[in-house]
């Protein structure tokens, strides 16, 4: 996380066990927890700020779990021989309750801590409950806590399929665990009804009350928390950079754009495309901030890797910041890096690597859609996405040293001439590693920032919406598919500003042109991954739904290139499979990474949507 020392001072009455009052190191120690005692007064602004910052310390504990569960169950990651038993279980979809990645404890801890902070704000600053009162920083803190809690529920229900609803009166992890593990109803001793006139005029019931256990499935979680976020949030995110002149603080906490993103992805997951578009467009068309989340040259070409070496408000919407100087580290390098002392337990799948290596730039074709079998490549172009792929998202390490990028380019050119033997010699004996969290890092750093939401991800979600969303113009219903294509290729759906030309997701790394951009037509040609020769075609003439699926497939491939290993791949596959009512979509992609002898077994297993979830609460 950030250096929060400026915002923490010695406060004798502050009873929050995660904070060692003079040390940011101890303040964000993930082995501790928030435990706010309600009978203490909160008279100092820094007390509230300290509690708020502590929530982010708890959220940071979820990073490893989110990446492992969101990626290892997808099609882009596989285990190595070094994988521990818990990862092997996740990989094989045979996850036991004592698996450390299956545990909901960190979600419950974040939910209970958010409950506690929400209650403190309601008690001491009841104006947060009044939609007509002037907006204050307490309203902004309240918005952050509500977003944090909704985010925790949404991520948890995608993992478990159903989650217990944690009552707001349950404000410690012990209370939550006792509630979850109780049989029948749970007896709670205090019930406080907060009113707009403050805590002192409210009624406190010290007599026992009964809390019934209710489990929310995904639809109920989305309905409940979208309603809460839409109607209870007045503002989100305290403006810290006014004090410290550091704009990155804005995107290191929950903020208005992150609030819109959370609502947008919940609505998209539910299938409400209109509401999803409404919130995503608040980000992509944000005029008041000079369209800051449209994709310009800021992270184009060689600069794309800078998304992972720093934090910038033109790409990052909400990013968890880590800093080894304050012992704020994560285990992502340990999981992925093959250099000692790291463990190299997970690596990219062959398909993940092909997503970048089989992408061709600047090729030309002779096209005859009336006789598609005669269409052929005139100039095969240049293979490989070397701005997002090799050396950025993944790498080949030989004895701990990355193979030179020029050698990998040579390898791909050899493959394009079908000289596979010479090509294989270049990477012989090398480890294929996820490199996204090791860019610019020493082996002992382990403090790569983790993007929860970023601009390219939202742009691709919006493209996904536009693939299916239609609008009415002069009484005629028209599709928005052209906008989906433009978002990915060149950003031409946006107003062009000479000072800030938009480039699109692929366009900013050189693949948004006439031939190398994504496109959908009646005849769609298939290419050999290594030679780029035309090897077939798909005829979608008169099949509009088929064209939508084909476009969606290409958008999902683009998400795989742009957002690989960032924790969301499995949920992307789930969302598309459910939208199509076709579990084979997910089953086919995930099963393909398994050895031949196990592929059919995994395919059949994953045809049952019930097997996509960890059944922790059965």
Image (tube, grey):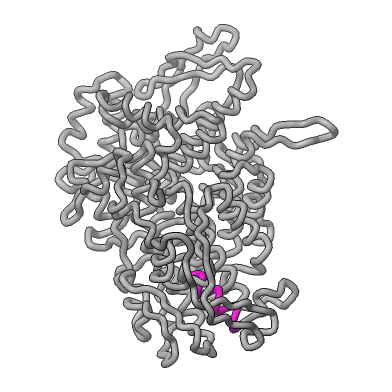
Residue closer to the observer: 121 or 487: 121
Does residue 386 lie above or below 174 as drawn? above
**Residue 438 can be seen, yes or no:** no
Which secondary structure type mostly characterizes the magenta part of the structure?
helix
**Is residue 565 shown left or right of residue 137?**
left
Position of 477 with respect to 66 (left or right) is right
Q: Is residue 14 left or right of residue 413?
A: right
Question: Residue 416: horizontal and vertical position, in percent?
Answer: 32, 22
Quick one: 180 or 593, which is closer to the camera? Answer: 180
Identity of the residue furthest to the bottom in this view: 12
Q: Position of residue 535 (x, y in %)?
A: 43, 14
Q: Nearer the viewer, residue 305 or 30?
A: 30
Q: Residue at x 21, y 46 (%)?
A: 83
Q: Quadrant of the N terminus?
A: bottom left
In reply to whether residue 116 is colored magenta, the answer given is yes
Determine whether 209 is above or below 339 in the image.
below
**Would residue 75 appear left or right of 404 to someone viewing this image?**
right
Percent position of residue 357, x then y: 36, 32
Residue 363 seen in this snapshot: yes
Rendering coords of residue 613 (x, y %): 41, 43
Closer to the camera in the image, 567 or 128: 128
Range drawn in magenta? 114-124
Above or below, 544 against 13 in this view is above
Residue extending furthest right?
Answer: 474
Q: Name the residue at 56% across, 11% down.
A: 368
In this rendering, is residue 227 above or below 31? above
Query: Which residue is rendered at x = 38% and y = 35% of the image?
Result: 356
- Residue depicted at x 32% and y 78%: 26
Q: How many numbered marks have been drawn onto this rendered protein structure? A: 0
Residue 198 placement: quadrant? bottom right
């Amino acid at each position: 996380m950030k250096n929060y020392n400026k915002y923490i001072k010695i406060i004798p009455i502050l009873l929050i066990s995660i904070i060692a009052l003079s040390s940011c190191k101890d303040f964000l120690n993930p082995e501790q927890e928030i435990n706010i005692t309600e009978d203490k007064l909160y008279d100092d602004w820094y007390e509230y700020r300290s509690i708020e910052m502590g929530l982010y310390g708890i959220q940071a504990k979820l990073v490893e779990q989110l990446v492992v569960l969101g990626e290892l169950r997808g099609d882009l990651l596989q285990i190595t021989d070094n994988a521990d038993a818990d990862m092997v279980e996740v990989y094989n979809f045979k996850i036991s309750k004592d698996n450390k990645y299956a545990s909901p404890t960190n979600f419950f801890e974040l939910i209970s801590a958010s409950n506690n902070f929400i209650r403190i704000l309601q008690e001491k600053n009841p104006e947060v409950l009044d939609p007509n009162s002037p907006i204050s920083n307490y309203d902004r803190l309240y918005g952050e806590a509500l977003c944090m809690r909704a985010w925790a529920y949404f991520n948890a229900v995608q993992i478990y399929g159903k989650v217990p609803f944690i009552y707001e009166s349950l404000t410690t992890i012990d209370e939550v665990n006792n509630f979850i593990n109780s049989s029948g109803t749970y007896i709670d001793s205090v019930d406080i009804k907060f009113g707009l006139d403050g805590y002192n005029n409210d009624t406190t019931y010290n007599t026992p009350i009964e809390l019934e256990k209710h489990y929310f499935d995904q639809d109920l979680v989305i309905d409940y928390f979208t309603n809460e976020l839409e109607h209870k949030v007045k503002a989100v995110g305290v403006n810290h950079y006014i004090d410290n002149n550091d704009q990155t603080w804005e995107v290191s906490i929950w903020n208005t754009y992150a609030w819109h993103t959370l609502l947008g992805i919940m609505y998209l997951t539910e299938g409400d495309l209109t509401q999803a578009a409404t919130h995503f467009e608040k980000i992509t068309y944000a005029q008041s901030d000079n369209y800051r989340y449209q994709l310009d040259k800021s992270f184009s070409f060689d600069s794309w890797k800078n998304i992972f070496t720093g934090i910038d408000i033109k790409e990052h919407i909400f990013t968890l910041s880590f800093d080894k100087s304050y012992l704020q580290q994560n285990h992502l390098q340990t999981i992925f890096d093959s250099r000692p002392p790291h463990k190299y337990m997970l690596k990219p799948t062959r398909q993940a690597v092909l997503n970048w290596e089989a992408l061709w730039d600047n090729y030309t074709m002779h096209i005859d859609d009336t006789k598609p079998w005669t269409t052929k490549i005139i100039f095969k172009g240049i293979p490989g996405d070397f701005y997002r792929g090799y050396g950025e998202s993944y790498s080949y390490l030989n004895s701990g040293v990355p193979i030179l990028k020029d050698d990998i380019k040579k390898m791909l050119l050899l493959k394009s001439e079908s000289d596979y033997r010479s090509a294989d010699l270049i990477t012989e004996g090398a480890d294929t590693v996820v490199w996204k969290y090791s860019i610019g890092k020493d082996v002992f750093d382990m403090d790569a920032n983790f993007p929860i939401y970023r601009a390219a991800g939202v742009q691709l979600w919006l493209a996904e919406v536009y693939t299916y969303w239609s609008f009415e113009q002069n009484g005629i219903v028209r599709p928005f598919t052209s906008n989906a294509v433009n978002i990915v290729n060149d950003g031409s759906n946006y107003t062009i500003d000479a000072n800030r030309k938009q480039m699109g997701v692929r366009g900013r790394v050189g693949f948004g042109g006439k031939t190398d951009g994504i496109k959908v037509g009646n005849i769609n040609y298939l290419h050999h991954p290594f030679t780029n020769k035309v090897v077939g075609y798909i005829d979608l003439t008169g099949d509009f739904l088929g064209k939508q699926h084909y476009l969606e497939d290409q958008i999902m491939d683009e998400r795989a290139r742009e957002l690989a290993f960032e924790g969301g791949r499995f949920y992307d596959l789930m969302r598309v499979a459910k939208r199509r009512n076709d579990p084979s979509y997910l089953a086919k992609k995930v099963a393909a990474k398994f050895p031949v002898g196990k592929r059919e077994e995994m395919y059949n297993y994953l045809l049952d949507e019930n097997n996509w979830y960890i059944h922790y609460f059965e």
